Image (tube, grey):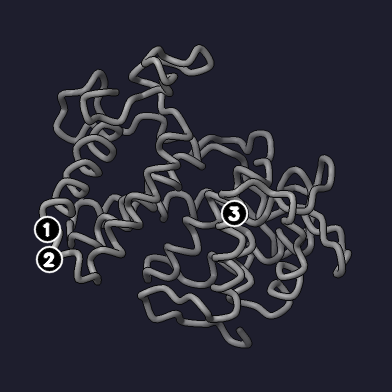
Amino acid sequence: DGEGCLDYCFRDADGTVNGECDSDEGVMPTYPWRAMRGLARTLKALRISSLYDSRSGDVEALRDFLWTDVIDKWLDLDGDGPDAGLRGSDTAGILSRMAGILLDYSHATGDAEAGRLAGAWIARIATDMEPSAAVEGAYVFDNWVGDAPLGEPADTSHSNEIVVALIEGFEAGLLTYAFIEPLHGTLLDVMWNGDAASPQFSEFVDGTGGLFPAQVVMGWMRLGQFKRETQQVCEAVDYSTSYDLETIEANGNLCRMFGLALTEYPLPLPDGG
C-alpha cells in the first residue's frame, strides 16, 4: 500500500483501489494471500541457505513482514485490528492457504504459536471432510469449514487448496494417512472421466458439472506421490494451455510424484505406496 504493508485489496498502478475488490478490512481477499505463500516458502528455503546468515537483515525483514503484515494482519493476534479472531476463517481455501503460510513460518523460525495454529486448522479441515454417500471410500465436501449441513459441493479448482493442506499436514506428521486415502477415491472414482490417455475431471468434487483437463494440477496432482494408480492418471494430465502459475505447480507436483523433489520431512508411505 506504499507504506510496506500488504493491502486488503488490489491497487492499480496509480494507487487507486481496484473497483472489483472489497476494501473492507474485515474481508479476506484471496489473491494477495495466495501470493504470500510464495514468500513463506522463500523464508523456509532461506533457513537452510547460506543467505540466512549472509543476508540476515533481509531475512529478518521478510520474517517481520510475514508475521506483522500477513499473519497478524489476518489473525489480529495483538488485538489492534478492526475485529478480533480469524477473519474469513470459514472459507476452506483461504484457511488452507493460511495454514500453509503458518506451517512454513513455523518450520523456518521455530515459532511454536504458528505451528500450533497450523496444526489446529489442518485438523479442522481434515475433520470437515465427509464420506461420500454415492461412492464408498471417497470424500465429499464444500468450500466452507464447519458449516452444517453440507452445502454446495466444492469446485475442483478451488479444492486444490484443501488437498494441499491435507497432504502437507500428513507430511508434517500432523495427520495420519487415513485422512489422505479417501482423496484418491474422490479423484479417481468420482471426478476422473476414466480416460487414461487424456484424463479430464469434473467441475465439482461430487462428479457434477463439465469436464476439464487441468484443474487438478494445483493440488490434486500431488496425490500421485503416494499411489501408482493416481500417479499414472496425473502424469497424463494435459496442462499445455494452463497459465504460468498452474504450469509451475504442475511441474513441481510431477517432480514430487517421481521423487525428484522431496520435502524436508521423512515421507511415511502407506502400505503398497
Q: Amino acid at mark 1?
A: Ser
Residue labelled with disc 2: 53
The spot of residue 117 in percent (x, y) is 29, 50
Q: Nearest the camera: 164 or 154?
A: 164
Quick one: quadrant of the C terminus? bottom right
- Residue at 18% of width from left, 57% of height from top? 112
Mark in the foreground, 3 or 1: 1
- Residue at 17% of width from left, 57% of height from top? 111
> Residue 227's image quarter?
bottom right
The spot of residue 154 in percent (x, y) is 65, 41
Q: Please, is residue 84 above or below residue 247 in the view?
A: above
Q: Please, is residue 147 above or below residue 247 in the view?
A: above
The spot of residue 90 in percent (x, y) is 45, 34
Q: Is residue 177 visible?
A: yes
Q: Nearest the camera: 139 or 202?
A: 202
> Quick check: 228 left or right of 252?
right
Q: Dot 1, crowdedness within 10 Å: few (<14), some or many (≥20)?
A: few
> Residue 66's image quarter?
top left
Lower position in the chain sequence, tag 2 or tag 3: 2
Instruction: Compute the Cα span from label 3 to label 1.
Output: 32 Å
Which SS class for mark 2?
Answer: helix
Q: Amino acid at mark 3?
A: Met
- Disc 2 + disc 1, Cβ < 8 Å: yes
Which SS class for mark 3?
Answer: loop
- Residue at 12% of width from left, 58% of height from top? 56
Residue labelled with disc 3: 218
Which SS class for mark 1?
Answer: helix
